[in-house]
Image (tube, coloured by chain):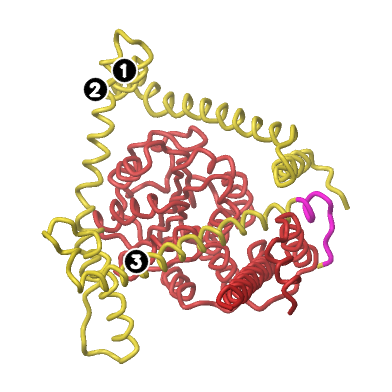
Chain colours: A red, B yellow
Amino acid sequence: MSDGLLQKFITLERKYIYLVVLIVAAIPTVKPLGIPIVISEETRIFYQEIEKLEPGDVIFLWITTDAGDYPEIGQTSESILQELFARDVKVLMASGRMATSMLFLPNLERISDKFGKVNGVDWMYYGYIPGEEVAMASLAADFHSIPVDVYGTPIEQLSILNNLNTISDVQLFIGALESPDDLAAVVRQIHVTYGAKCLVTVTQKCLSAATPYLGAGQIAGILKGVRGGAEFEQITHRPGLLSQQIDVQVLVQGSVLILGFSYMISDAIIRLKQKKEVEK
Amino acid sequence: MISSDPAIWVSALLSLFVFSYLIKETVLYHIAENTLVTTTLAHSIVTGVVVIMTVAVYPILRGNFVNIIPLFLGLMLITRLSKKYAWLSKYGTAYLVGVGNGVIIRSVIQSDIIKQIQATSFSLLTDPLKLFNNLILSSSVIVTILYFIFTIPKYHEMKAAKYINKWARWVMIVGFSFSFASVMVSRISGATRFLNLVLVDWLGIYFG
């Protein structure tokens, strides 16, 4: 390849690179390619834990996400919720972020209607609870510490909370977490303090923080970002938006890798040639 | 077919306004930015008021007078705005920090230290691949910890320390690279959702 071409490539303006990535991303968005999704071992382990639940069991779902991360873990939470409702598992839910209620509640109601579930009997949602880790600790110690649910209904009127007082009374804790701090809070306040089994679905950026907890057995199962969510959709036979997004993810990540490596190789070739010319 | 839902129109247009920043800082970008800031602030204020009313004020009105204490401590935080009475806010802050730290400290040693040390230790009586992985993991942890030791006199001047430090730097570079790559993949997910919103939900271009 000629030096001029290599030099042009490494000095290419960013807008052309953005354009290439945009085209690569747009094609599978409008025309899904159906790239097969291989179910990972982590997703299988996560699903096996959910399979162990019996009808009538109660689990706690803690969701912390803002609008930016909702496409990753919010939609995964919806997939998990569908599987739980399909198994007649009762779900208690709460959020650690203000935006979560706004984003999650309409979808929760839609899924509840789809499965014929009743608020207060089959599920209940506390809504946003301020205080992050302290709020989590307080709620885990006493489910009745928050006087009302997201609709303003007094807790005493919700039959789902009969005979449920602390996190030890539920069979499973599932965290949909957007930051490493939330993940650490779940491990500290739920797993270590009460010995409760914890499954988590995390954003991709939390993976480096999640790996030590997973290795130490403090997290029983994990779904990793969009890929984990897409795999969960596949394993539960309910393909949705996340499965469609995998095509785009694979192509965009592949194109970024190719562009990145091409740049590094071109730069290395030019530097080597310049070094040889200087030595001459 | 193009969407007739006003919410999708607003979402798509504001998303495009934000992406106009890639060309240059435009008026459209500022419109989107300021809309985000103001709506987030408004939502936060409304949510804050609703939470305080439901969790603190209404229980007080129903006879649960214990809630007066945290409500009073929270109100003391506002005194920070006054130069004369700002010292009162320290009581509220102290309570917040104290409870926060107390809740964390009771379990952080078990979760972040003891369990992690246990997980790093390993048995030699295992299959070769696992043993190799465990050796890499444990040695990487040890050299990284040694890299940050500054209390042993002249440790970093030793010849062996040079190689250990180089090894530790490579371990950290690989770790940080992995974190950066994870964040990048996370951002691609957000961009993917944006494309889906604009092309499929808004413009109705779909050949699935």
Say which quadrant the N terminus of chain A sits in: bottom right
- Which residue occupies the foreground of this view, B182 or A167? B182
The chain to which mark 3 is attached is B
Magenta span has A90?
Answer: no
Q: In the picture shown, does residue A247 fall above or below A11?
A: below
Q: Which residue is mark 2?
A: B91
What's the residue type where badge 3 is placed? Arg
Q: Residues within 10 Å of mark 1 (few under 14, many from 20)?
A: some
Marks 3, 1: nearer the viewer: 3
Magenta highlight range = B198-207
- The residue drawn where x is 17% and y is 69% is B158
Do the residues at discs 1 and 2 belong to one chain?
yes
Circle 2 sits in a helix, a strand or a loop, which is it? Answer: helix
Q: Residues within 10 Å of mark 3 (few under 14, many from 20)?
A: some
Query: Does label 3 or label 2 sit earlier along the sequence?
Result: 2
Do the residues under discs 1 and 2 have CB atoms within 8 angstroms? yes
Which x, y percent locates residue B77? 33, 20
Q: Which residue is mark 1?
A: B76
